[in-house]
Image: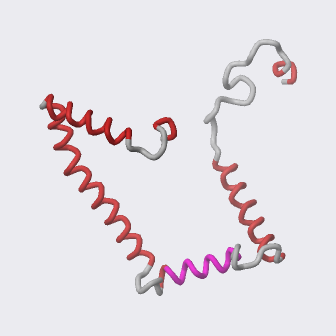
Amino acid sequence: MLDRVTRAKPAKAGKIFGAPGDGSSGLISFATTVVLVALWFTVTESGWVKPLFLPSPLAVWDKFILALTDGVSNSTLIEHTLASIGRVFGAFLLALVTAVPIGILMGSIASCAASSIRSSNFTGRCRRLPTCRW
């Protein structure tokens, strides 16, 4: 194998270590998660960081169960999640209802397309950051 690595010409993808994305990464993901959680336990139990800044995994788990069952701010975690999902879908529906007719108008009427180009050029000049920053 060392013979293949030291050659002058470059190797094709997958010849030495396998192509990117080839094979299962489940074991690597699991091992990384276990190591990070163990490090979290070690840091919090040894007292290197105050619990105010980094609570222990058990304290986080307890608060999660509390939020799931009793709730936070007079609502459970499920109610907060459903409210957030409702806001996201409501905003999507509003954008869909307004953007599709405007796009159809711009595609079918030349004067609408020309006016939208002028207005986007105007707003482009009024930005606080240069265009390349976006």
Position of 49 with respect to 95 (left or right) is right
Q: Magenta region's main secondary structure?
A: helix
Q: Decide: is 90 above or below 71.
A: above
Left or right relative to 34: residue 89: left
Instruction: Return the x and y of residue 75 as percentages of the image width and height.
Output: 41, 82
Relative side of 2 to 64, left or right: right
Question: Quadrant of residue 36 in the image?
Answer: bottom right
Relative to 112, 123 lies left or right: right
**Is 61 in the magenta?**
yes
- Residue at the spot x=41%, y=86% of the render? 74
Q: What colour scheme has been applied to the protein in the rendered image?
A: secondary structure
Q: Which residues are magenta?
A: 56-67
Q: Is residue 28 above or below residue 103?
A: below
Image location (x, y in percent) of residue 104: 16, 37
The quarter of the displayed image where residue 35 is located: bottom right
Residue at 43 percent across and 81 percent down: it is 76
Identify the residue shown where x is 27% and y is 61%. Answer: 90
Above or below 51: residue 84:
above
Q: How many marks?
A: 0
Q: Residue furthest top?
A: 9
**Front residue of this view, candidates 22 and 127:** 127
The foreground one among 71 and 28 is 71
